[in-house]
Image (cartoon, rainbow, N blue to C red):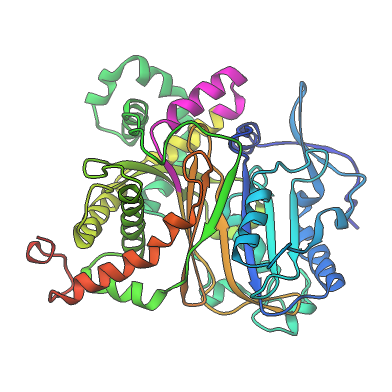
């Protein structure tokens, strides 16, 4: 039998080290999530589910240790599950505002580094039903791996969700249900071919910076990667807007009303775009409306979002760790017309399909994991100045799930930001609906609800705009002019 407490050290991968070292008072490196349930799970049943399934991943019984000898994983010999699975009650009316404050407090509070860096908080008295808030440090895993972890804890049957075991013959294979594919992945085919070039990229990256004439040769895939590195380093800083300024140490979280995924798919099909195009163009419209509301002119504004791109096969997600790169996606805040915004985003996403930005950023994260702190901070500040927000879109399960005997009615999560970026936007589809989440520094937006309320409104505006014009599956100039 495996001994969880052998106290052995396991050195941390360079990319995971980067996420551990990236944390600052202004930007904690936690992924925060929520599950709204139809009834309150029995606490002992929930503990048993966590013990049998979540903790079947050895990593979650380990501390992330960083000292003069290096960065490594070490078994927590004093591990106590009740220190990580807690019950909570909201004060006052236990309404949306109280839950919003509770989640924001957690998102602004660091995890205890003397223990494994994760927690479950079972909120027992929210007015619309129980809620489970989850916090996991980014150094443990990326979002695609954590979705797989979540699926290992759930079932499509209420009764089976009470008896789930990792080695159970009745264990469900969620992949067969088509529940999860990948992150927003605008260049997956290109990136798979580029992975083998990672070591070459590390060797020639500095040479490319010192000798930009290499880019003119432009013949091989390696040179393409060098070009992406050069382009990333020379990308202009994002403009100063209400969404990009000095950061505090407080993050506020909010979530929007759900949107029907079927309607989003219908618009994507009718316009010859994708679900991602439609959702991203709508959020650009929401950011535009907020700027107008606070008296800021968005008409000449284009901002960048950093978008995670999965760089490993889905079946390897169970190994945890971080295996993704980042791409810069331009958001057309300047555009008032919903269909023109959709066309702009669609074209930008098509350009990213030819890009190798993700493999470049993955290599840079590996380098940051090895670099001295001063160089790490310099690199983080350099790249974070080039974007205003982190944008994550996760296609989740499209059937209802159950956890510890309770049905999951709605799911939401918030991604961490780094460096000088103070805003994170999350999109998650679950059980036929699309959920929008926003987390933003208090010094930028005091109440994120004023931004996120526009997400469904922008979707309605796009629908209205389309109803006024015929279409045949493509965006045409007579529709968008």
Task: Please state the horizontal and vertical placement of residue 61, each as a whole percent of the image.
Answer: 81, 50
Residue visible at 23% across and 47% down? 334
Q: Residue placed farthest to the top in the image? A: 210
Residue visible at 74% across and 71% down? 125
Task: Place residue 153 in its image quadrant.
Answer: bottom right
Q: Is residue 38 left or right of residue 400?
A: right
Whether 379 is among the magenta residues is yes
| Front one among 379 and 352 | 379
| Front one among 38 and 56 | 38
Task: Place residue 205 in its image quadrant.
Answer: top left
Q: Quadrant of the C terminus?
A: bottom left
Task: Please state the horizontal and vertical placement of residue 464, each as a whole percent of the image.
Answer: 23, 73
Q: Quadrant of the N terminus?
A: bottom right
Q: Is residue 217 left or right of residue 321?
A: left
Extent of the magenta region: 368-390
Whether 215 is among the magenta residues is no
Q: Can you say whether 306 is above or below 129 in the image?
A: above
């Amino acid at each position: 039998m495996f001994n969880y407490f052998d106290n052995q050290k396991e050195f941390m991968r360079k990319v995971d080290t980067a996420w551990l070292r990236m944390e600052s008072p202004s930007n904690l490196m936690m992924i925060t999530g929520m599950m709204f349930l139809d009834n309150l799970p029995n606490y002992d049943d929930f503990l048993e589910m966590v013990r049998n399934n979540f903790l079947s991943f050895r990593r979650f019984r380990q501390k992330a240790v960083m000292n003069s000898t290096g960065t490594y994983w070490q078994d927590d010999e004093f591990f106590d599950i009740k220190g990580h699975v807690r019950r909570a009650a909201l004060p006052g009316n236990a309404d949306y505002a109280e839950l919003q404050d509770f989640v924001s407090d957690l998102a602004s509070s660091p995890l205890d580094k003397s223990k494994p860096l994760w927690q479950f908080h079972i909120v027992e008295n929210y007015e619309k039903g129980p809620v489970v808030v989850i916090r996991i440090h980014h150094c443990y895993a990326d979002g695609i791996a954590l979705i797989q972890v979540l699926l290992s804890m759930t079932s499509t049957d209420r009764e089976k969700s009470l008896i789930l075991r990792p080695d159970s013959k009745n264990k469900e294979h969620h992949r067969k249900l088509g529940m999860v594919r990948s992150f927003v992945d605008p260049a997956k085919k290109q990136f798979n071919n580029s992975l083998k070039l990672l070591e070459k990229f590390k060797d020639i990256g500095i040479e490319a910076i010192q000798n930009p004439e290499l880019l003119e040769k432009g013949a091989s895939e390696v040179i393409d990667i060098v070009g992406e590195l050069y382009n990333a380093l020379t990308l202009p800083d994002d403009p100063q807007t209400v969404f990009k300024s000095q950061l505090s140490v407080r993050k506020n979280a909010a979530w929007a009303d759900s949107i029907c995924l079927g309607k989003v798919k219908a618009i994507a099909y009718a316009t010859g775009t994708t679900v991602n195009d439609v959702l991203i163009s709508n959020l650009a419209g929401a950011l535009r409306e907020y700027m107008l509301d606070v008296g800021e002119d968005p008409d000449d504004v284009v901002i960048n979002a950093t978008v995670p791109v999965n760089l490993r096969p889905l079946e390897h997600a169970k190994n945890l760790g971080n295996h993704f790169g980042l791409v810069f996606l331009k958001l057309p805040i300047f555009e008032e017309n919903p269909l023109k915004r959709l066309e702009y985003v669609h074209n930008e996403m098509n350009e990213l399909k030819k890009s190798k930005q993700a493999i470049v950023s993955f290599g840079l994260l590996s380098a940051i994991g090895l670099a001295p702190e001063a160089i790490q901070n310099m690199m983080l500040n350099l790249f974070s100045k080039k974007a205003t927000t982190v944008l994550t879109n996760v296609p989740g399960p499209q059937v209802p799930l159950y956890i510890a005997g309770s049905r999951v009615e709605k799911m939401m999560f918030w991604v961490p930001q780094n460096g000088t970026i103070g805003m994170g936007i999350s999109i998650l589809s679950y059980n036929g609906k699309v959920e929008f989440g926003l987390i933003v520094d208090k010094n930028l937006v005091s109440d994120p609800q004023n931004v996120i309320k526009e997400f469904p409104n922008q979707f309605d505006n796009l629908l209205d705009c389309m109803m006024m014009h015929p279409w045949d599956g493509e965006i045409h100039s007579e529709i968008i002019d």
